[in-house]
């Protein structure tokens, strides 16, 4: 067990990403992205006035971070007053804002949620696993779907009983 406790993980070590620095040449694309996302989030917290220690980070900091990222988005999200609101392929440009796509935010939260726990954070206090984050992501998904005129339909899970439930209860699958 390491010398830092779960309540002060990331503090007192040389970097909040020490866990990732064991084999930098052999990281998968996912692991590389997770490390980059973790570093970006850590830098975001450090740049807050006053800086926010990782151990004091909560879901409001995560929500602020997600809103901050919108300025770097590439997905056009039409506003309700826009003549192209609800059109999947508008015929001309408009002045509506660019935002982060829902799928990108959802994947980002998944990576940060995993990174938080890999860096010593407790699953019970994981701000990326908060109900308010799930609500925010759901609202973004619905808003973007309406703005683009594309109804979001939840995918049905395949009911393949020959491979299904027995295997999933005893084995963890990662994708």
Image (tube, rainbow, N blue to C red):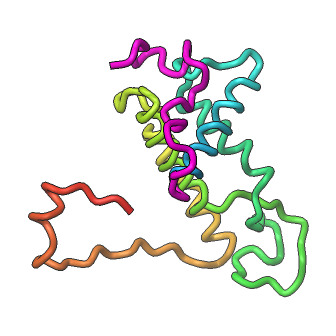
Magenta range:
1-30
Q: Position of residue 129 (x, y in %)?
A: 43, 40
Query: Left or right of 8: which side holds 89?
Result: right
Residue in the image at 59% along x and 31% along y: 60
Q: Position of residue 7 (x, y in %)?
A: 43, 16
Residue in the image at 70% along x and 44% along y: 67
Q: Position of residue 170 (x, y in %)?
A: 13, 55
Query: Left or right of 32: which side holds 70?
Result: right
Find out whether residue 27 is within the magenta segment: yes
Quadrant the N terminus occupies: top left
Find out whether residue 11 is within the magenta segment: yes
Residue in the image at 56% along x and 24% along y: 57
Q: Answer yes or no: is residue 31 visible.
A: yes
Q: Nearest the camera: 49 or 38?
A: 38
Quadrant the C terminus occupies: bottom left
Query: Left or right of 147: which side holds 25?
Result: left
Residue in the image at 18% along x and 57% along y: 171
Q: Answer yes or no: is residue 138 visible.
A: no
Q: Nearest the camera: 167 or 78?
A: 167
Q: Position of residue 8 (x, y in %)?
A: 48, 15
Q: Is residue 144 above or below residue 49?
A: below
Query: Left or right of 118: which side holds 88?
Result: right
Quarter occupied by residue 130: top left
Q: How many marks?
A: 0
Q: Nearest the camera: 14 or 162?
A: 14
């Amino acid at each position: 067990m390491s010398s830092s406790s779960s309540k002060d993980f990331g503090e007192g070590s040389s970097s909040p990403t020490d866990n990732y620095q064991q084999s930098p040449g052999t990281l998968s694309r996912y692991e590389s992205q997770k490390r980059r996302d973790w570093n970006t989030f850590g830098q975001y917290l450090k740049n807050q006035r006053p800086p926010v220690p990782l151990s004091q980070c909560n879901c409001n900091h995560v929500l602020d971070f997600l809103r901050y990222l919108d300025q770097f988005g590439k997905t056009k999200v039409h506003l309700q007053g826009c003549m192209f609101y609800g059109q999947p392929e508008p015929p001309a440009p408009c002045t509506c804002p660019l935002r982060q796509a829902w799928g990108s935010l959802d994947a980002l939260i998944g990576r940060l949620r995993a990174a938080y726990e890999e860096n010593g954070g407790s699953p019970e206090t994981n701000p990326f696993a908060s109900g308010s984050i799930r609500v925010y992501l759901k609202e973004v998904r619905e808003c973007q779907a309406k703005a683009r005129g594309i109804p979001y339909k939840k995918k049905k899970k395949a009911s393949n009983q020959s491979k299904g439930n027995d295997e999933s209860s005893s084995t963890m699958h990662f994708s």
